Structure formats: C-alpha cells, structure tokens
Image (cartoon, helix red, strand yellow):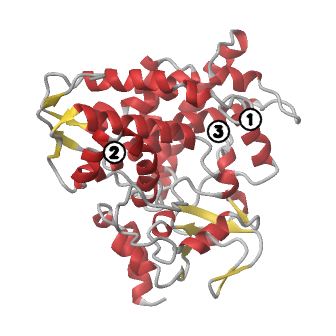
Amino acid sequence: MTQTQGSLLRKILDYAHRPDPYPVYAELRKTPVLHEEEGPYIVSTYWEIHALLHDPRISSDPRNLDPEAAGLVAEEADPGLPPSFLRLDPPEHDRLRTLAMAPFGVPNTPRRIHLMRAELSAIITELIDGFEGRDRIDLVDHFAYPLPVTVVCRLLGVDREDEPRFHTWAETLAMSPDPNPGKDLAERQRITRQARTELAVYLSELIEERRRAPGDDMLSALVSGRGPDGRMTHAELLSTASLLLVAGHETTVSLITNGMLTLLRNPGVLARLREEPHLAVPMVEELLRFEPPVQVLPQRTPLADIDIAGVTIPKGASVWLMLASGNRDPQRFLDPDRFDPRRKDNQHLGFGSGIHHCFGAPLARLEAQLALTELARRLDNPRLLEDPPTYRRNAVLRGPRHLHLAFDGLRKAGG
C-alpha cells in the first residue's frame, strides 16, 4: 500500500472534504480500481461503475461478503428487521421489488406519481406560505425535510403526528451504511439495532391495523398485495415499509437542498428557472449528476473473481462504487465540473443503474422539480448566509445539515 493510496481513502472519508469531495475524486480516478491492504476495492470511473452495476456477478447481499474483506465497517445481520430488497439478489430481489412496485407505479399503477402532482404542489405552497413574515430560513428544517416527510407519510398512510418518532430512527438507519461513523463499531451497532427494533415494533402495529381495516394507502396495498409467488411475509413487509419510510425522504431532502445550494451558486440558472419553469426537468437531471445525494454504494461483493480495468477483484471482496466520482468522469461527460442544466446525453448515476436502480426515482424527481421551481419563483432575492454550509457527517449520503438563506420577501402563490 502506497502512501498515496492510503491518503486517498482517508480523504474520501475525511469530513473536512465533505463540502467539496470532487478534487479527491479526480485524484481517485487516476487509479480506476484502487485497493489497499485490508481495505475495499474502490471503483471510481463511470464505465467501470456502470459495468459492475449491470454485472450479475456483483452481489448486494451482505451475506456474500467475506467478513475479513468487509472494509471499515461490516453490516450486522438483524433478524428483527431483515435486509430490504435493495440488499438482496435475484430471485428474492425480483420477487420483492415486483410486489413493492405494484402499488407504486409501472405497470400496475402507472399514473400514481402523475396524479400526485396537485397534492405535491399544495404541500409546497403551504410550506412556502409559512415563510411569511420571515427574512431568513433554514431550508433544511423549514422546507427540504418537511416536504418529503409529509409526502411519504401520506403515501404510506402514516400519521404525520408520528413523524417525531421515526425522525430519529430514519436518521440512525440512514447513517448505517456510512463506512466512517466516527464512533466505535460496537456502539454504532447497538444504536442501529435499537432503532431497527423500535421501528419494527411501530411498523408491526401499523401493518396489523391495515390487516384489520385496509385503506387506500400504499401500506394497505402492500399488506394485501399478491404476486405469482404469493404475498410478502410479515418480516418482508417490515423491511419494505422501513425502506419506503426511510429512503423515501432522506435522499430527497439532500436532492432539494443540494439543488437550491447549486442554484444560488449559479444565479443565472436560478433566474432562468424563474422565467422558464420547463427547465426544471433537465435541471434536476443535471443536479443528480453534478451533486448527487448518494455518493457511494459501499459493500458490494463479487460472487466470482472479476477482472476490470486491469485489476482482479476476488470473490467475496468488499467493493465500493463511487457514483459521484463516475458522474464527474471526463471520459463520459464533457466539461464534467460545469453545472449545465441543458446538458445532452445525461445518463448519470444519481439513482444508480441496473436491477437496483432507485424505484422511488419518479417521485423524487417530481418533488425536486416542483420544489425548486416554486422556490425560485416565490423567494425574492434569495441568497446564502453561509457558504459552504454545514454538512452532514455521512460519507454515503451527502448533503447540507443546514442551509441558511436570506430573502427580501415572498411573491404570491400562483402569481
């Protein structure tokens, strides 16, 4: 292991680089597949990441990971709340994903997200109306967090008043894949186990309520849903509902916050969005490339030895796929460090790719498009009070913990 390699791994995990990790990624791409002793194989270039995301020999199931090659942190099995289908391989993954998708979108309910547009717009308008009388806000606490939480609660049929209960659970579980937790492993696993247990108890009560009195929400549909291989087991319902509750808002918070931060750093684009709301669609795609919430997919593992970029990754090894680095790869994207909302051929890795492509992507896209457009239109002269802002410590899910803004007033809704 060279000093350069060792320092690169430390830089990836070092909180000091969280505000701007991209120079580290540029250095990392000089060695497309980096490996150091007793550490993971880190893949940082677009085409290599894309190939592995589509390679059936790459497993997402932590049970296939060699514990001695697990990198800095190994996930601990939890019989109370088993891994979601994101951490499973076919055929189990395919069966559970199909059941989860049935009430959420294509092919069973293809218009579900589209029909939520009016409801999303109403929630966004109400949140921004709440800024009245203020001249500064924390975008995270006052907007970017409440929006997706409200949406996912309504989608699943969860009482919004219960939000404080699962906020802590969600933040704890969102931190669980982080390879650099800043705490000793035993303490971290204890806290994670406790959060999973408490969330499992909470969801079990909701599931039993839906069995007795189903509604028109997504959780009721999951409870009653049946596929070619039958229904979800109780444990599978727990893991799927937990995934939807946690992943359904954590990434969207960062997408909206990263998006507004990027727009305020690019005032010309912000002004164009205000006058050209249709720009929101390609702009959000560029945000997913330029500042993706999910920076890295850690702890994937080959089911057989795999040769890539001149390196043999052995069976059972820990592999980290640096999605955010691949999104800035000059071998794939022209002038990749430039934010260009009209970029063509923008096949980014912001939602992953392959069989584990984020199935909540249509909802996250729509939330970000509507939210950023309305913020641009209604906030008069918005500006950053702190740049860079304070970031979350999480190296996997990157985004500001706070984004303090000042503005001169609000434009009227619909005006």
Residue in the picture at 72% in, 15% down: 211
* Residue kind at label 1, given as amino acid type: Pro
Mark 2 falls on what kind of element? helix
Task: Classify 10 Å Cα crowding around label 3: few (below 14), some (14-19), many (20 and above).
Answer: many
Above or below, 346 relative to 223? below
Pick whichever, 311 or 273, lies toward us: 273
* Residue 389 seen: no
Q: Label 1 belongs to which residue?
A: 107
Residue 382's image quarter? top left
Which label was assigned to residue 383? none
Q: Secondary structure at mark 3?
A: loop
Please identify the quadrant where the C terminus is shown: top left
Residue 86 shows up from this direction: yes
Residue 246 percent across, percent down from the top left: 52, 38
Circle 3 residue: 81
- Judged left or right of residue 204, residue 363 is left
Alpha-carbon span between mark 1 and mark 3: 28 Å
Q: Nearer the viewer, residue 159 or 292?
A: 292
Identify the residue shown where x is 44% and y is 72%.
334
Q: Quadrant of residue 340?
A: bottom left
Please state which amino acid type lies under the numbered disc 3: Leu
Which residue is the extreme one toward the right?
228
Residue that mark 2 sits on: 257
Residue 205 in picture, x, y percent from top left: 62, 19
Element class at badge 1: loop
